[in-house]
Amino acid sequence: LFKILTCILDNSKISEYVLPEIVWDMIRITKEHDTRNNGSVLKIANQFFELADLTIIWSKLLNEADKSQSIETIEVLSYALQSLKITEQSIIATNIVPIATLIVKKFHSYSADVKSHVCQLLRVINRVIIKMDTTYGTLL
């Protein structure tokens, strides 16, 4: 599937319409298969994500963080930040802080069982920011 989608990415006119519709499912599927197959899918998936438009990916991550309060969404966001090659510095600088801010603003509305997963996600975000550039400081 990733190899087929990588071919689609070669045509920017098609990918600008297809990618926003499938990227969240592709991240979720990658996490699911990576967990079951000990990373064998991750290499192929990362080839796809390296070629994909990162602004579309990060826009979808922000959208999902905004609309969902499920543990699954929080875990997929955390997985994406830790495992996928979607971490170009200029894109992170403009997108990760809004995601963290949104999550912090919504913290009071999360259920008790989701809050522990949200705290873990915020720690992941903090590590990504520190790894990217130490001038940003720390969130936690």
Image: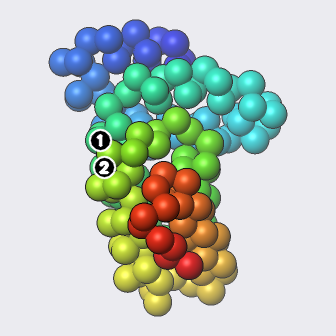
Q: Residue at x 53, y 61 (%)?
A: 130
- The amino acid at mark 1 is Thr
Residue ID for mark 2 = 59
**Seen in the image, is 47 located left or right of residue 39?**
left
Whole-percent x, y for residue 22 in the image: 40, 34
Residue 11 vs 75, above or below: the answer is above
Residue 92 vs 88, above or below: the answer is below
Residue placed furthest toward the left: 13
Q: Secondary structure at mark 1?
A: helix
Q: Secondary structure at mark 2?
A: helix
Image quarter of residue 113: bottom right
Tag 2 and tag 1, C-beta contact below 8 Å: yes
The local crowd at label 2, few if under 14, some if 14 to 19, many if 20 or more residues have their Cα within 10 Å, is some
User: Where is the C terminus found, in terms of image quarters?
Assistant: bottom right
Residue ID for mark 1 = 55
Q: Residue at x 37, y 41 (%)?
A: 57
Image quarter of residue 54: top left
Residue 84 vs 14, above or below: the answer is below
Do we see residue 16 in this rendering? Answer: yes
User: Where is the N terminus found, in terms of image quarters?
Assistant: top right
Q: What separation in Å lies between label 2 and label 1 (alpha carbons)?
A: 6 Å
Which numbered disc covers residue 17? none
Whole-percent x, y for residue 104 in the image: 43, 80
> Is residue 20 or residue 82 the one in the foreground?
82
Residue 32 vs 18, above or below: the answer is below
Q: Residue at x 75, y 41 (%)?
A: 35
Whole-percent x, y for residue 107 in the image: 47, 83
> Is residue 132 or residue 11 the one in the foreground?
132
Residue placed furthest toward the front: 135
Whole-percent x, y for residue 99 in the image: 38, 64
